[in-house]
Image (cartoon, helix red, strand yellow):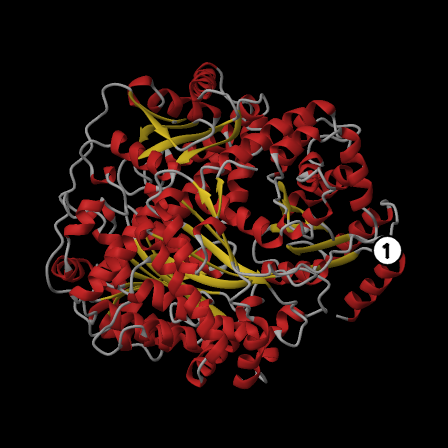
C-alpha cells in the first residue's frame, strides 16, 4: 500500500520531467503557493531539497541556496564562525581561482550577488538572466563541495569581519543594544551570542576550524535550493541532477545539542550609557518558536500595537510626543523566540515613560478584547505586509527558503498568514495574558553618556 | 496598446501633469507615486528642511479630516502612504490592497488638494524632526555622508540635508509651509507614476482629475552648476572613542546625458562600482582586509552632482587606507583602465542591464527618475544599448578630463586627536589646513 503512491510519483515524474533521472529523486510534488501559482518541490536521494516557482514576467530568475546552519549551531569559543564561513564561501575552490566565482557571475550579468547569516540559517543569493541557469547551478555545486580554505585567506577575511563587527556593533549604539538584548534574554541557548561573534573568538579561530565547519554543514542534506523566475522545473531538475546529483551527504554528522533556554523567572533589566543624543528602549518577551499555533496571533498583535499610524502604540507614544518611532513584532525563529518592542524617544523624554505606556497598553488588552474594526484593520495590514514581502522573484525566494528552514517547510510559513484570517479578539487576549507578563520580560535601555 | 496611447494623448491635452501606470496583476496590490519636480534644492535660505516638512504635513490634516482620521482611514484600507524627499523631488509613496483602491484614491486626492496644515501638528512635527536629527547623530555613516555633501557643495543647495537644521526647523511657520505648498504643488510640476493590479484607465482618469484641480505655475526652480574646491581638502568630523572611521571623498560629477557619462560609468565600474572585482574592493578589502566595503559611484541631478568614494576602515588603518585610495585615483587618471578590465566591465554591465527594468516597480521608479531629472523617455532602459559602442579610448580619455585628484573634498568621521596628523600626511597637507568639526555641529 505504501509503495503505490511512490510508483505513481515516478510515473508522473517521467511524464512531466522527461529528461529527469528518476533514480536520483526520492520525492517530488507540486504545492500551491499564492493564487494559482504552485511550487514544485524535488527531494534528491542525497537529501538536497529544491523548490521551483515559475514566473515568466521577465527573462530573469533568482537562485538562492539556503543552509540549515546559523550562529545557533556554533559553540562557545567559536562564536561568529557561521558568518565568517559565509565570507569564505566566496574564496577559491578546486576549479575556481580566487575571485573567479565573483568574476564569472559578474560577467554573466548577475544582480544582487550576496549572502547572509542569521541565528538559524545561512543563505547565498543572486539573480541572473534566464539563460544562465546552468552556469549558476555549476558554480554553486562547486563551492558546496570543492572549497579550499587556506589560512592566509582566512586571516584576511577575519580582518574584514572584524571591520564588519566594528561597523555593526562596536561603533553603533543600536548594535550594542541589540547584542545586550540577546545576551540578557538568553542565558543558556546559543541565540544569546551575536551572529557576528565575539572579537576574541574571531581572533583565535583558524582555517582548520573553518574546514571542519564546512565538512559538517555544507552538504546536500543541509541545503535547500530555491529558484524563482523564468525557468522550467524540468530544466532545473535536469541541471540540479547533473551538478549536485552525484554529491554525497557523507562526512561528519551534525549533532545539534543546543541547550534549551530555561524559563525566565523574573524581569531582567540593563541600562547602557552610549553615544546617543536621545534615549532608546528595547523590550522583549519570550515567546514560542515560529511553528507554534500562537504565531498568527502575534502577527495580528504586532499590527494592532505598532503597524500603521493609527495603531495603539503609535497613537499613545508618537502622537503624544513621547517617541519618534515605535515598532514591535516576533522574531520568526526555529527555536523559542522573542517578541520585541523598539522605541526611539523624543528629545528629553525618558525610555521608562515608553516602557510604562507599553505595559499600560498590554494591560488594557488583557481587560478588553480589541474591537472587530480594529481586528479587521490589523488583518488588512498583515495581509498587505505579507504580499509586499513576496513582491519580486528574490523576495519570493527568500520567503520560501527562510520558512523551509525555520518552519520546517514553506507551507507552514504560508499557514501563518492563512491563520491570521481566523484570529479572534479572544486569541489576542489569550496570548497577551499568556506571554506578556512581568517575569517573562527583558528591558534594555540606551541612554546618553 | 492603441487604446492606451490614445488615452495618454487625451490626458496630456487637458493636463500638464505627467502620468504613467503599468498594470501588473501578479499580486493584488497597487503602488502609486505622486511626485513634484523639486525637492530639497527648493528649501528657502534659512528654512532648510522645509520641503521635507511640507511633505510630512500633507499627511497630517485636511479641511475635513484630522491626522487621526487620516491615519485610521489608511490603516483600515491596509494601505501605506509615506513621503520621500530627495534633492530634486518630493514624492508621496503609496501602496494599497487593490480591493481598496477607490477609497485610497479619494483620500489621497483630498490630502493633496485640501491640506490644512494644522498648527497643533506643526508643533508636534517640529519636535519629531528635531528628535530625528538628534537620533541620526548616533549613526556615524549618516553623519559623515551629510557632512560630506555639505563640504563638497559648500553653499550650493545640493549640499542641503533633507531633514534640515534644528535651528531652521524651529523657525518654520505655517505661512512658510503654505507658501511652499503653493509653489511646489502645481499642475506643471506634478508626476504620477504607478504599477499594480488596477486598470490604467481608472488611474489615468484619477490623475487627470487631480492635476486639473491644482493651480498652474510654469515657473520651475532652476539649480545652478556646482563647482569643485580649488585644492584637495580634508575635514575631520570629530567623534570620540571611534574604533572605525567613515571616509567619504569626491568631486562634482557628470550629467547623465553628457557624452562623457557612459564612458565614465564603465570606468567607474572598474574602479569602485560595487562589484567584488572592482579595484577599490580588491585593494582595500580583498587583499588587505582594511574595510568591510569600499565603493565609488555617481549621484545624479538635473545638474552634474557628485562622484564619490566611501570606505570605513578600522581607525588604525585609516591614514594608510585613505592614502592608498588617493593614489589609486591619481593612477586611474594617469594610466586609465586596462583593456581586460574594460572588456570585463562592459560585458558585465551589458549583461546585467536588464535588471534595471525587469520588474514593474523598477520600471515605475525609472520613469520617476527620468521625469524628475529631465532625462529623455526610456533613458534608464537604454543603459545596455548606450554602453555597447563605448571604447576603451573613450573611457580613458574621459577619465583624464573628468577626474580631479587635486581638487577632491574629503570627510573623515573619527577621533580627531588620534588621526589628524597622520591624515594630513596622507593627503599631503599641513595639519593646520585640516579642519576639525565636532560631529554635533550643525
From the viewer's perspective, is residue B285 above or below residue B82? below
* B108 on left or right of A118: right
- Residue B48: x and y in percent read 67, 40
**Which of the 4 image quadrants contains residue A40?**
bottom left
Residue B369 position, x and y percent, is: 66, 60
Q: Is residue B324 left or right of residue B109?
A: left
Foreground residue among B237 and A71: B237
The residue at the far top in this view is: A367
Query: Is residue B154 rendered to the left or right of residue A428?
Result: right
Give the total number of marks visible in the rendering: 1
Give the residue at x 36% y 56%. Answer: B319
Residue A107 image position (x, y, % from top left): 42, 77
Q: What x and y, as percent, mark residue B93?
A: 64, 47
Residue at position x 77%, y 34% from top? B176
Which residue is tagged 1?
A: B15
Please tell me whether residue B345 is drawn above or below residue A76 in the rendered image: below
**Chain of the residue under the numbered disc 1 shown in the image:** B
| Quadrant containing the C terminus of chain A in the rendered view | top left
Residue B113 shows in this picture: no
Element type at mark 1: loop
Residue A180 visible (yes or no)? yes
- Compared with A130, B365 (above or below) is above
Image quadrant holding the N terminus of chain A, namely bottom left
Disc 1 crowd rating (10 Å Cα; few below 14, some 14-19, many 20+) is many
Q: Nearer the viewer, residue B431 or B116?
A: B431
Amino acid at each position: 500500500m505504501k509503495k503505490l503512491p511512490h510508483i505513481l510519483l515516478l510515473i508522473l515524474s517521467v511524464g512531466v520531467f522527461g529528461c529527469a533521472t528518476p533514480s536520483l529523486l526520492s520525492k517530488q510534488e507540486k504545492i500551491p503557493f499564492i493564487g494559482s501559482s504552485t511550487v514544485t518541490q524535488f527531494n534528491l536521494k542525497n537529501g538536497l531539497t529544491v523548490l521551483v516557482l515559475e514566473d515568466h514576467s521577465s527573462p530573469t530568475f533568482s537562485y538562492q541556496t539556503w543552509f540549515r546552519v546559523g550562529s545557533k549551531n556554533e559553540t562557545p569559543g567559536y562564536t561568529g564562525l557561521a558568518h565568517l564561513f559565509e565570507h569564505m564561501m566566496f574564496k577559491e575552490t578546486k576549479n575556481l581561482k580566487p575571485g573567479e566565482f565573483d568574476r564569472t557571475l559578474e560577467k554573466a550579468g548577475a544582480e544582487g550577488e550576496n549572502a547572509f547569516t542569521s541565528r538559524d540559517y545561512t543563505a547565498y543569493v543572486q539573480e541572473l538572466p534566464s539563460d544562465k541557469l546552468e552556469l549558476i547551478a555549476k558554480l554553486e555545486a562547486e563551492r558546496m563541495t570543492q572549497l579550499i580554505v587556506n589560512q592566509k585567506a582566512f586571516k584576511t577575511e577575519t580582518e574584514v569581519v572584524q571591520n564588519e563587527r566594528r561597523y555593526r556593533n562596536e561603533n553603533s549604539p543600536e548594535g550594542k543594544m541589540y547584542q545586550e538584548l540577546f545576551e540578557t534574554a538568553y542565558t543558556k541557548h546559543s541565540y544569546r551570542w551575536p551572529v557576528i561573534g565575539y572579537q576574541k573568538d574571531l581572533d583565535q579561530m583558524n582555517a582548520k576550524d573553518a574546514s571542519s565547519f564546512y565538512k559538517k554543514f555544507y552538504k546536500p542534506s543541509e541545503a535547500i535550493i530555491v529558484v524563482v523566475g523564468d525557468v522550467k522545473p524540468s530544466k532545473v531538475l535536469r541541471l540540479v541532477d547533473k551538478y549536485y546529483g552525484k554529491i554525497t551527504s557523507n562526512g561528519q554528522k551534525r549533532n545539534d545539542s543546543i541547550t534549551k533556554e530555561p524559563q525566565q523567572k523574573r524581569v531582567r533589566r540593563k541600562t547602557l550609557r552610549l553615544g546617543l543624543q536621545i534615549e532608546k528602549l528595547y523590550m522583549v518577551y519570550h515567546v514560542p518558536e515560529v511553528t507554534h499555533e500562537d504565531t498568527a496571533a502575534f502577527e495580528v498583535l504586532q499590527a494592532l500595537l505598532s503597524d500603521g499610524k493609527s495603531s495603539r502604540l503609535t497613537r499613545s507614544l508618537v502622537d503624544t510626543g513621547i517617541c519618534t518611532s515605535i515598532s514591535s513584532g516576533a522574531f520568526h525563529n526555529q527555536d523559542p523566540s522573542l517578541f520585541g518592542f523598539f522605541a526611539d524617544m523624543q528629545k528629553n523624554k525618558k525610555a521608562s515613560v515608553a516602557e510604562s505606556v507599553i505595559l499600560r497598553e498590554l494591560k488594557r488588552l488583557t481587560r478588553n478584547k480589541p474591537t472587530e474594526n480594529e481586528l479587521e484593520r490589523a488583518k488588512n495590514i498583515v495581509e498587505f505586509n505579507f504580499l509586499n514581502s513576496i513582491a519580486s522573484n528574490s523576495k519570493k525566494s527568500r520567503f520560501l527558503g527562510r520558512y523551509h528552514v525555520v518552519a520546517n517547510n514553506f507551507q507552514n510559513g504560508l499557514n501563518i498568514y492563512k491563520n491570521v484570517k481566523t484570529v479572534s479578539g479572544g486569541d489576542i487576549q489569550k496570548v497577551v495574558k499568556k506571554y506578556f507578563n512581568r517575569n517573562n520580560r527583558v528591558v534594555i535601555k540606551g541612554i546618553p553618556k | 496598446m492603441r487604446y492606451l496611447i490614445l488615452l495618454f494623448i487625451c490626458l496630456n491635452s487637458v493636463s500638464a501633469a505627467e502620468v504613467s501606470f503599468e498594470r501588473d496583476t501578479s499580486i493584488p496590490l497597487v503602488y502609486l507615486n505622486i511626485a513634484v519636480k523639486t525637492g530639497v534644492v527648493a528649501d528657502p535660505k534659512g528654512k532648510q528642511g522645509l520641503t521635507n516638512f511640507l511633505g510630512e504635513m500633507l499627511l497630517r490634516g485636511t479641511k475635513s479630516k484630522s491626522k487621526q482620521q487620516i491615519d485610521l482611514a489608511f490603516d483600515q484600507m491596509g494601505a501605506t502612504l509615506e513621503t520621500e524627499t530627495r534633492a530634486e523631488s518630493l514624492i508621496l509613496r503609496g501602496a494599497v490592497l487593490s480591493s481598496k483602491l477607490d477609497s485610497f484614491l479619494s483620500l489621497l486626492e483630498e490630502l493633496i488638494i485640501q491640506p490644512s496644515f494644522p498648527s497643533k501638528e506643526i508643533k508636534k512635527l517640529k519636535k519629531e524632526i528635531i528628535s530625528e536629527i538628534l537620533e541620526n547623530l548616533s549613526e556615524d555613516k549618516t553623519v559623515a555622508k551629510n557632512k560630506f555633501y555639505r563640504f563638497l557643495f559648500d553653499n550650493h543647495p545640493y549640499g542641503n540635508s533633507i531633514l534640515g537644521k534644528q535651528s531652521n526647523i524651529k523657525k518654520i511657520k505655517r505661512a512658510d509651509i503654505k507658501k511652499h505648498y503653493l509653489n511646489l504643488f502645481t499642475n506643471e510640476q506634478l508626476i504620477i507614476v504607478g504599477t499594480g493590479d488596477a486598470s490604467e484607465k481608472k488611474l489615468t482618469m484619477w490623475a487627470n482629475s487631480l492635476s486639473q484641480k491644482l493651480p498652474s505655475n510654469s515657473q520651475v526652480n532652476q539649480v545652478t552648476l556646482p563647482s569643485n574646491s580649488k585644492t584637495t581638502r580634508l575635514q575631520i568630523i570629530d567623534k570620540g572613542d571611534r574604533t572605525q572611521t567613515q571616509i567619504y571623498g569626491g568631486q562634482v560629477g557628470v550629467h547623465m546625458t553628457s557624452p562623457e557619462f557612459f564612458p565614465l560609468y564603465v570606468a567607474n565600474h572598474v574602479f569602485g562600482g560595487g562589484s567584488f572585482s572592482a579595484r577599490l574592493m580588491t585593494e582595500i578589502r580583498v587583499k588587505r582586509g582594511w574595510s568591510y566595503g569600499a565603493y565609488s559611484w555617481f549621484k545624479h541631478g538635473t545638474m552634474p552632482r557628485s562622484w564619490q568614494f566611501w570606505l570605513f576602515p578600522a581607525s588604525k588603518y585609516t591614514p594608510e587606507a585613505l592614502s592608498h585610495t588617493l593614489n589609486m585615483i591619481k593612477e586611474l587618471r594617469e594610466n586609465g583602465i586596462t583593456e581586460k578590465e574594460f572588456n570585463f566591465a562592459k560585458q558585465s554591465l551589458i549583461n546585467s542591464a536588464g535588471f534595471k527594468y525587469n520588474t514593474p516597480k523598477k520600471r515605475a521608479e525609472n520613469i520617476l527618475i527620468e521625469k524628475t531629472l529631465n532625462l529623455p523617455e526610456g533613458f534608464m532602459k537604454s543603459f545596455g544599448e548606450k554602453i555597447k559602442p563605448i571604447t576603451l579610448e573613450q573611457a580613458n580619455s574621459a577619465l583624464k578630463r573628468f577626474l580631479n585628484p587635486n581638487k577632491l573634498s574629503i570627510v573623515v568621521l573619527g577621533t580627531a586627536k588620534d588621526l589628524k596628523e597622520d591624515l594630513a600626511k596622507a593627503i599631503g597637507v599641513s595639519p593646520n589646513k585640516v579642519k576639525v568639526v565636532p560631529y554635533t555641529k550643525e
